[in-house]
Amino acid sequence: MGRGPRGVYVHVPFCLHKCHYCDFYSIAGDGDGGRRDRRGVFVQRLIEEIRASSAFLGPPIETTFFGGGTPTLLPSGLWKILLAALSDHQPRAADHELTVEANPETVDEPLMEALVAGGVNRLSIGAQSFDPRHLKTLERRHDPARVVRSVQIARRGGIANINIDLIFGIPGQTLEQWLEDLQEVLALEPTHLSCYALSYESNTPLTAKLRAGRIKRIDQDLEARMYEVVIDRLAAAGFEHYEISSWARPGRRCRHNLRYWRNDQWWPLGPAAAGHVAGVRWKNVPHLGRYLREGPLPAITDVERLDEDGRIGEELMLRLRLIEGIECGLLQRLLAAGVRGRERGVAIMRHTDAGNLERSSDRLRLTRRGLLVADSVLADLL
Amino acid sequence: MPIRNFSIIAHIDHGKSTLADRLLQLTRAVSDRESREQLLDTMDLERERGITIKASAVTVHHVYRGDDYQLNFIDTPGHVDFAYEVSRALTACEGALLVVDATQGVEAQTVANAYLAVENNLELIPVINKIDLPSARPEEVAGEIEQVLGLPAEECMYCSAKTGQGVGELLDEICRKLPPPRPPQTDETRALIFDSRYDDYRGVIVYVRVFDGSLAVGDRIRMMGTGRQYTISELGRYTPAPERLQKLGQAEVGYFVASIRALPDVRVGDTVTGASNPAHEPLPGYREPKQIVFSDFYPASTSDVTGKRGGYDSLRNAIEKLRLNDASFSFDPIHSDALGFGFRCGFLGLLHMEIIQQRLEREGGVQIVQTAPTVSYEIQLTDGTVREIHNPADLPDPALIQAIREPLVMLELICPTEAIGDLMKLCDGRRGVYKTQKFISASRRILEYELPLAEIIYDFHDKLKSITRGYGTMDYEIRGFRPDRLVKVDILVNGVPVEALSLICHRDNAVKRSRTIIKKLKQQIDRHQFEIPLQAAIGSKIICRETIKALRKNVTAKCYGGDVTRKRKLLEKQKAGKKRMKMVGSVNIPQEAFMAVLEMGK
Ligand SMILES: Nc1nc2c(ncn2[C@@H]2O[C@H](COP(=O)(O)OP(=O)(O)OP(=O)(O)O)[C@@H](O)[C@H]2O)c(=O)[nH]1
Ligand code: SF4
Ligand SMILES: [Mg+2]
């Protein structure tokens, strides 16, 4: 077996239209079948990149994640070619997890057939909300009914492992409305749920509206309540809360995402995709034009190799996002190695006293209270 | 040669400097080509703002009825804060041109400066200026001058400093009407210092008016007040270009240089006499103005709040350098727990403060963070002693205080008649005591109130302007100190008093003032993991309270592969921000919070 990364992230930079809260790299208008459609050349170029990078990976590959953008904007024909090339050049482990992010309005039977045929076994559907008013605030252009249909199509097509993304804390949203969203989503019986508090990223129309006073951020206490109710509601429904914003049925945790939080390695493909290999983080240049012109490996940017102490801080920051927390043996090793070990030790004690962290048997983890203020805790451990 | 010494005085913007330019031009001291607007205003800031800050003296010649007259005149600033410059100038003169804008009429500083001149026994020539303007109403304004100042309307001169119309006649009138300098009263030399400035190469340049005897290059002189002795190395006058002389005779005005190293070595108002043959009595002096408004200046660079270096040093250099040129403000180093090292500066008024701050920033290249201005207070202690403080934090233990006295001013407002009601309401609301009302013309009145200085240093002027749609003007004069129900209000964060935020105010205003402060503070302090009470207290009595709720949620929802670096940097920033904050009672208060509360105007 190779020593290269066993995870692959593929970024598909097309969207039908830009949602107002989104700061992902994607282009609206180049993936809609119009004159400027660049999906075909993109897939060709991606295959070239897959080929050129295969030597660095695994083998075998254990997890692959297609994100975006809207990967499901690629037509089924292109998916077939792409997935075939991927399996040719990247040998897969037997229990390979292959996730594709999907927007409800783009899911149909032929697509699903192509995906499943190509080895896709997990679908992640961006529902965000079931309330048209809140979808409007987010400028998400889908009909909530499409979410239900997407789930049906996926399941009938043979995908059992389905994640649904939801957003809470949308301006104007009430606690009751949020509970209704949860009710609706549970009725769809997903195996995995990602529930995010809405965040206002810089350079998004939503943030501009906030600054201009055209929308109002919801009250912090209400947002905290919303987070608490989702924790309780999903626990009652039999989901395991395993990361700050992630819940899964037993055995259905997203193994690809776990890589991120366990500070594991993965390889990036496509423009704007970020990677982490051998202690180095980098990002492919977020520019479709350049990506198409240059190659076979794309130009990279934001290259970062932290010193040991920095890496330790980062690992603590990531691992403590997991509800399981961090195993004490590992924690001891991390605290012993960094120059800020003592400082971190003191901070851990302080937050333990304050009830934000707890030690249970052999792990240190955030308490329920600590989960709500995780950033304040994690900042002290960096 | 006959001599006339006079000043040009007026309300701000009525055209003193422009008239001075015309006088220079008509007497051919400057050719048309050289003439630029407001020639005597040389400071950058003066040109930019179009206002005169420092007085300046020049000498020109005019032939009247066959005689060549030497005219020495001083252009002065018109703003109330620079009244001390006017007072200095007047001590050197026998007469003054009282310039009044023909469109504006008599204004607050017209009256104030006219009275100053009368107190100094000066002969006044009322000059109605800007008659070229279509909206000019010269006869009406002449009526106002007669009504308010008692100067006969028919004695008014009419001119346009802009077009030069009437300026020739004015020059004749100056020679005719203004009295000649008084004859010498002693054999010994006596010259009055009415100004001084600093030159990098020559040291202090001293401006004098010779009253008795004369000064010559090489003379050994003595300053009667300080007792210091010097030798005159250079003598001259401005025409307006500097012109060197060997001798400055009886009644003349000019400057001398005598290797004087620092401005504080020279006292404006002091008398210069011969070292070997000193006069027995100095000339009637001139009282230096007292700083009445105080504000703390801190370097704006907050990169290093713990140490003194960097911003503080540049600020100190800038202040010391400006001080060489301008002794009108005071400064003392201070340290505040909240804001680090800075200076408590004293000013003659709000505009004065603003000008000094801008000069420091501009000429000294420093960025200044400035706290809200306060007045000085006299503290009467139970042991009978009196202490003056400029900072609420310096207040002694309340048990030792018998009374707190605050500066009281006599305020004179000149305003349109219809604004009287609203202005009285404004003054009454500011603890004002109505004194009197005077008639200027059918449409304008003078309103007099006595009220605490503290009540007018904030936004009074803005309020006046808005009530009178820009037509109202004000002048005030300190009338001493008066005790009132003044209290010290402490601001407590999480139960701990924050010295830098405490204030002195009237008991009746305490709740309102502290509520504003606490509200601002609340916006600036982040939620903590615990609830934070913000309180204002007089002694142990809490007068208002707000609560910053405990932090309920602070967690980044998404942290996937591409977010790791950004997220880490964000948290690092959060952490670094916290380090730069000031810890008070386990609460982190950002510097901006202090600024928001202390900063003026908001
Ligand atoms: N039309 C007209 N404008 C004038 C006349 N005299 C002065 N001004 C204008 O009035 C404004 C103020 O003139 P200044 O000479 O700066 O007034 P000042 O009295 O020296 O002002 P301070 O020194 O700031 O008190 C300037 O814009 C002048 O150009 C005049 O006779 N006619
Ligand atoms: S579909 Fe997803 S990637 Fe595209 S704009 Fe909306 S949120 Fe962003
Ligand atoms: Mg002027």
Image: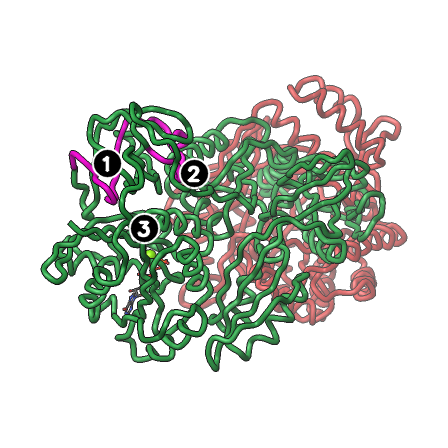
Chain colours: A red, B green
Callout 3 secondary element: loop
Q: Is residue B364 above or below residue A98?
A: above
**Callout 3–callout 1 Cβ contact below 8 Å:** no
Name the chain letter of the residue that bears numbered label 3.
Answer: B
Whether labels 3 and 2 share one chain = yes
Q: Which residues are magenta?
A: B245-272
Of mark 2 and mark 1, the one earlier in the sequence is 1
Which residue type carries mark 3? Cys
Callout 1 secondary element: loop
- Mark 2 = which residue? B327
Whole-percent x, y for residue A232 in the image: 87, 52
Left or right: residue B152 versus residue A284 is left
In percent of the image, x 66 and y 29: which residue is there?
A: A313
**Separation of residues labelled 3 and 2 (CA atoms):** 22 Å
In percent of the image, x 38 and y 75: which residue is there?
A: B141
- Mark 3 = which residue? B93
Whole-percent x, y for residue A78 in the image: 51, 56
In percent of the image, x 76 and y 54: which residue is there?
A: B507
**Separation of residues labelled 2 and 1 (CA atoms):** 27 Å
Q: Nearer the viewer, mark 3 or mark 2?
A: 3
- The quadrant of the image that shows the C terminus of chain B is bottom right
Left or right: residue B134 versus residue B468 is left
Q: Nearer the viewer, mark 2 or mark 1?
A: 1
Whole-percent x, y for residue B39 in the image: 24, 53
Which residue type carries mark 2? Ala
Q: How many marks?
A: 3
- Mark 1 = which residue? B214
Callout 2 secondary element: loop
